[in-house]
């Protein structure tokens, strides 16, 4: 197994303060008692402004915590805005909507601003950016954009500070509770939590996809999916398209003449290493080039279409999974298991894009059923003031493939942020929080449990 989670990590202890820096190599490791005194302080710091981090920050702030949200890009939204991931996947079980709360509130905002179709699934990532700004700022969250967390300062089992890098320099920022919403579990890994990568048999993880959109498509002349796939197979056989994906995956968009493609596939590249990400981005763009040429040459309706947009980064489905107090399994998902400490509900299928090449494995939940995610999946034994609130919560590779979709991550985020604020109010560790009370507060705030 590649040990990418720790390969570029190192430690430095200073006897004077007891603070241990753990993070990316190459950055000044020093932390002293002076550092501790100088750090700006919040009740809760959330790192990562995606579908997990946004609701986590909003929920914590609306529950009276003083919150800082840190994001490495210049905008919020995570994969939705940076990698053009779209649409919102399933958040109903039969006739029942099972993800409400902040997710539902934000979808209402998108709808009111013409940024999502009436189906409440296909959205526009551009207005989403400023709508997310307003959503977090109006909830009282302080925002730090263009700032990348590069390590944590830990004392005993607690994170004292997060070290961030931005154009203004390197800063250490402190909080009582940290929320890891990086998708990759950066804080948790740096803080010494147990980490797993990929499936059990060979640690293969889901491939990446660079999404893109074609505009000016004559949609009325487009053939059906079967015919597109026949022509795709033919172009692959001729060597005109080199892409391990088995078929062409496309979606409509909010614009009638724009088609969204989630159909490139880059296998075996880790999101935890800049060199591998570079290879992935270059290969993703090469595949987009192949696909654009293929569409314009062979698919009716695309003759005059043009490449409107690619994700600013390639989409990452899976990197680290942080092992917490409970590990959610495929059996929990498929048996629609409920838990006494369930804090979010989910009904999306097990959906594994082949880590090794062609093919996608889908195992469906029984229609109308849903499983729950226990609060224990957000808590680690190794770090007592950290909550995980993104796709990397404690789950097996298979269970992760279901819970990773955006609406579910929104529900996890709301739960994580609410838990942080409750723990602050009670002056207790997140792991000591009474899950009944957390569930009660979530229901009061319109979440579906
Ligand atoms: C190709 C692809 C297709 C998908 N298709 C769908 C779909 O159709 N529908 C659906 O609902 N879901 C889909 N998903 C899943 C979904 O997009 C993700 O699982 C979801 O976005 C995870 O949310 P997150 O908040 O955990 O992580 P992310 O969305 O990755 O957000 C993490 C945020 O943290 C920031 N960050 C990371 N590290 C740091 C750091 N060290 N310092 C500061 N900031 C940091 C990132 O910039 C990012 O903004 C897809 C995913 C991919 C990759």
Image (tube, rainbow, N blue to C red):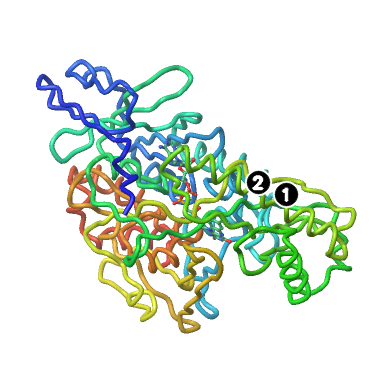
Measured as percent of width and height from the top left, residue 143 is found at 47, 32
Q: Are marks 2 and 1 in contact (CB under 8 Å)?
A: yes
Q: Is residue 112 visible in this depiction of the protein?
A: no
Marks 2 and 1, how far apart in space?
6 Å
155 and 248: which is toward the camera: 248
Rendered image quadrant of residue 140: top left
Measured as percent of width and height from the top left, residue 90 is found at 54, 69
Q: Is residue 434 visible in this depiction of the protein?
A: yes
Residue at 27%, 30% in the rendered image: 161
Dot 2 falls on a residue whose secondary structure is: helix
| Residue 443, above or below 55 | below
| Residue 1, above or below 118 | above
| Residue 195, above or below 82 | below
Residue at 63%, 63% in the rendered image: 120
Residue at 79%, 54% in the rendered image: 293
Give the labeled residue for mark 1.
289
Measured as percent of width and height from the top left, residue 423 is found at 24, 47
Give the labeled residue for mark 2.
285
Task: Classify 10 Å Cα crowding around label 1: few (below 14), some (14-19), many (20 and above).
Answer: few
80 and 118: which is toward the camera: 80
Checking the image for residue 381, the label placed there is none
Q: Is residue 277 left or right of residue 165?
A: right
Residue at 56%, 37% in the rendered image: 75
Q: Is residue 59 left or right of residue 247?
A: left
369 and 188: which is toward the camera: 188
Image quadrant for the C terminus? Answer: bottom left
Dot 1 falls on a residue whose secondary structure is: helix
Task: Classify 10 Å Cα crowding around label 2: few (below 14), some (14-19), many (20 and above).
Answer: some
Rendered image quadrant of residue 359: bottom right
Q: Is residue 241 left or right of residue 312?
A: right
Q: Is residue 445 left or right of residue 104?
A: left
């Amino acid at each position: 197994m590649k040990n990418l989670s720790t390969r570029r990590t190192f430690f430095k202890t200073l006897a004077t303060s007891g603070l241990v820096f753990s993070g990316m190599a190459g950055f000044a490791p020093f932390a002293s008692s002076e550092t501790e005194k100088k750090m700006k302080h919040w009740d809760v710091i959330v790192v990562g402004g995606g579908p997990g981090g946004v609701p986590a920050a909003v929920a914590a702030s609306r529950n009276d915590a003083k919150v800082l949200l840190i994001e490495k890009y210049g905008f919020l939204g995570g994969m939705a805005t940076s990698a053009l991931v779209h649409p919102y996947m399933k958040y109903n079980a039969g006739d029942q909507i099972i993800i409400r709360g902040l997710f539902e509130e934000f979808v209402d905002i998108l709808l009111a601003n013409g940024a999502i179709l009436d189906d409440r699934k296909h959205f526009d990532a551009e207005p989403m950016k400023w709508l997310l700004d307003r959503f977090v700022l109006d909830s009282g969250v302080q925002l730090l954009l263009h700032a990348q967390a590069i390590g944590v300062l830990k004392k005993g089992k607690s994170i004292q500070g997060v070290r961030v890098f931005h154009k203004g320099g390197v800063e250490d920022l402190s909080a009582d509770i940290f929320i890891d919403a990086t998708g990759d579990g950066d804080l948790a890994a740096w803080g010494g939590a147990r980490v797993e990568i990929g499936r059990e048999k060979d640690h293969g993880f889901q491939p990446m996809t660079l999404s893109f959109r074609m505009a000016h498509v004559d949609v009325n002349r487009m053939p059906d999916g079967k015919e597109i796939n026949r022509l795709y197979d033919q172009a692959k056989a001729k060597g005109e398209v080199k892409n391990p994906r088995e078929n062409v995956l496309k979606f409509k968009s909010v614009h009638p003449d724009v088609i969204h493609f989630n159909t490139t596939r880059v296998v075996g590249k880790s999101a935890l290493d800049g060199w591998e990400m570079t290879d992935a981005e270059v290969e993703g763009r090469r595949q987009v080039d192949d696909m654009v040429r293929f569409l314009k040459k062979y698919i009716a309706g695309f003759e005059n279409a043009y490449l409107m947009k690619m994700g600013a980064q390639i989409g990452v489905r899976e990197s680290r999974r942080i092992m917490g107090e409970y590990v959610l399994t495929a059996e929990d998902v498929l048996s629609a298991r409920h838990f006494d400490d369930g804090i979010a509900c989910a009904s999306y299928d097990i959906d594994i894009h082949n880590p090794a090449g062609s093919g996608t494995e889908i195992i469906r939940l029984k229609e109308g059923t849903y499983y729950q995610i226990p609060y224990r999946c957000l808590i680690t034994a190794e770090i007592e003031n950290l909550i995980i609130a993104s796709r990397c919560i404690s789950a097996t590779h298979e269970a992760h493939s279901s819970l990773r979709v955006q609406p579910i991550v929104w529900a996890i985020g709301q739960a994580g942020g609410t838990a942080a604020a409750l723990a602050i109010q009670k002056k207790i560790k997140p792991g000591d929080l009474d899950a009944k009370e957390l569930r009660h507060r979530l229901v009061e705030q319109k979440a579906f449990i």
